[in-house]
Image: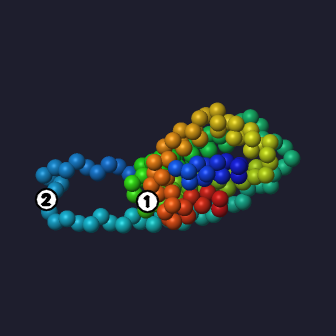
Amino acid sequence: MRSLAPVLLIATFVAACSSSKPAPATTPANVAGPAVAPAEPAEPATPAEPAEPAAVTGEAPGDAEVADVVAKATVLFTDLGDAIAHNASNCGAMAIAIDQTIDRHRPFLVESKRWKGNAAVEAKMLEGLQQTGVLEKTMEKMVPGLQACGTDPKVQAALAKMED
C-alpha cells in the first residue's frame, strides 16, 4: 500500500474529517458584550500505537479483503480531503484536522503496511481505488487548501504522519 501514500502526498503538495461549522449568523443577540478572542484549538490526544501487522505471506489477498481495504482507504481519503477543504483558509486548523484524521485512521494505515512491497497486491488495491474515483475527487477538493497551506510546516508535518 505504500505506493498509495506517495500518490496522495504528491497530489497534496501540488496544489479532516473536519467538524468545523460555519460561524453563526451575526444577530443582535450574539453580538452584545465585549469581544473575546477565540480560544486556541486543543492539541489532539496521542493515540496508542497499534500493533504491527502480520508479515506478508506468499498468499495474495482475496477479492473480499481487497474490497475491504479499498473501502477503508476510500473513507480515509475522503476524510482527509474534507479536513483540508474545510480548513482551506486556516493552516493551523488544517494541520490539526489532518492530524486528527490520520490518528483516527491509524489502525488502517498500520494494517495497510502488511502489503508494503508486494507490487501485485498494491496494483490490485490501487486499481480498486481508481475504480471508486475517490483519488480524483479528493485531489480536486484538496487543491485550493493546499495551494494556500501546502508549504506550512505544521501542515507538512501532519501529512508526513501518513508514512509513520
Q: Secondary structure at mark 1?
A: helix
For image coordinates 22% across by 48% down, the residue present is 25
Q: Quick one: 137 or 162, which is closer to the camera?
A: 137
Q: Position of residue 80 (x, y in %)?
A: 53, 49
Q: Position of residue 52 (x, y in %)?
A: 72, 60
Q: Secondary structure at mark 2?
A: loop
Looking at numbered disc 2 in the image, what kind of residue is underneath it? Ala
Q: Which residue was labeled with disc 1?
A: 91
Quarter of the image with the C terminus in it: bottom right
| Residue 17 can be seen in this image | no
Of all residues, the one furthest to the right in this rendering is: 58
Q: Which residue was labeled with disc 2?
A: 32
Of all residues, the one furthest to the top in this rendering is: 131
Mark found first going from the N terminus, 2 or 1: 2
Q: Is residue 58 left or right of residue 49?
A: right
Q: How many marks?
A: 2
For image coordinates 45% across by 55% down, the residue present is 148
For image coordinates 70% across by 49% down, the residue present is 3
Q: Quick one: 110 or 94, which is closer to the camera?
A: 94
Residue 21 lies, with reference to residue 158, above or below; the image says above
Local crowd at mark 2 within 10 Å, few (<14), some, or many (≥20)?
few
Residue 140 lies, with reference to residue 106, above or below; the image says above
The answer to whether the residues at label 2 and label 1 have Cβ atoms under 8 Å apart is: no
Please name which of the two marks, 2 or 1, marks the residue nearer to the observer.
1
**In terms of image quadrants, where is residue 43?**
bottom left
| Residue 133 can be seen in this image | yes
Looking at numbered disc 1 in the image, what kind of residue is underneath it? Cys
Q: Position of residue 91 (x, y in %)?
A: 43, 59
For image coordinates 62% across by 44% down, the residue present is 73
Q: CA distance from mark 2 to mark 1?
A: 29 Å
